[in-house]
Image (tube, helix red, strand yellow):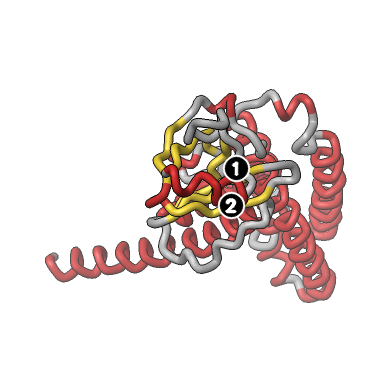
Amino acid sequence: MAGQLKEQFETIGKAAAWATAVLYAIGYFAVQLHFLRYDHHGFAEMVRAQYVAAGIWFFAPLVLGGFFVTALVNWFAATWSVKPKLDLMLKFLLLLVLVLLILGVILIAAFRPNHPWILRQDVAVRFLILSVIGAFVAAPFLLLYSHWASQGEESGDKRTLWQLSRQYFRLSTVLWFLMYVAAFESLLYPYVPQALGGGSLRSVQLAVEPDFKSSAIALGVQFSSEQGYLTGPLSLLTETKDEYVVVIGSPTLPVTISKRRVTLRELPRTQAVGGP
């Protein structure tokens, strides 16, 4: 009994380690893409909890969309499990994926990130929209391993046709995944608060040391008054152990400021500048 429990804990531990590594890798990639929108390169910042959180935000809509597609595929598989109709099922699957691709293009074109309706929505609605796109990603991928696909592999006379359909599903999955990455980076991640692992800009002011004010002005930082040492509203992109990275100007320009020279003050989100 003790040996079985030990083996189960080891299996769970290995699975958790692999899941954390995958979330970290995807999150690192997502965060760096987000930084590049502001021409900031944070590749050297390798250890950050934000990467795992960003990975969770990336995968969650995919998982939700995948659950929906799995339930739908299983329902169709249980309802239409007649083997002689494999050629009809194949045509149906190919048509389904084609329709999903067309609908997806329409969806992305109609609900682009700067669409007025999209701009009015909060994170929850954006998450649901991305989950719909996630369902489109999951559909061709899951159909590769569906009830019909396994039957098709067993039918010798249609094996070549099924193999071609698998290539079609793989290509559809790749195309949809690329569209999903673009939608995640523009539609959801920039609006998730940084406290939750997202990329939403934090509105801040910085109180600078007197001897650092001239350097800050040279970097393009504006101050609330000529005589004071408190900056105007700034948008904080990220922070490291030793530095703040704020974005200023239009187009936005990343400016790195040492934490030893300034004191940070949070502002309401409505005062943020230089971001979404």
Q: Quadrant of residue 176?
A: bottom right
Instruction: Work out how far the residue at label 1 is from the one at label 2, CA to CA, in angstroms.
Output: 9 Å
Position of residue 126 measured from the top left corner of the image (x, y, whole percent): 64, 34
Q: Looking at the image, which is closer to me, 263 or 150?
A: 263
The relative height of residue 100 versus residue 152 in the rendered view (above or below) is above
Q: Amino acid at mark 1?
A: Val
Check the picture and name the quadrant holding the N terminus: bottom left
Q: Residue at x 57, y 50 (%)?
A: 58
Q: Earlier in the sequence, mark 1 or mark 2?
A: 1
- Return the mark for residue 255: 2
Please tell me whether mark 2 sits on a helix, a strand or a loop. strand
Q: Quadrant of the C terminus?
A: top right
Which amino acid type is shown beneath numbered disc 2?
Val
Residue 166 at least partly seen: yes
Q: Position of residue 7 (x, y in %)?
A: 24, 69
Query: Callout 1: 10 Å neighbours few (<14), some, many (20+)?
Result: many
Give coordinates of residue 23: x percent, y percent: 48, 59
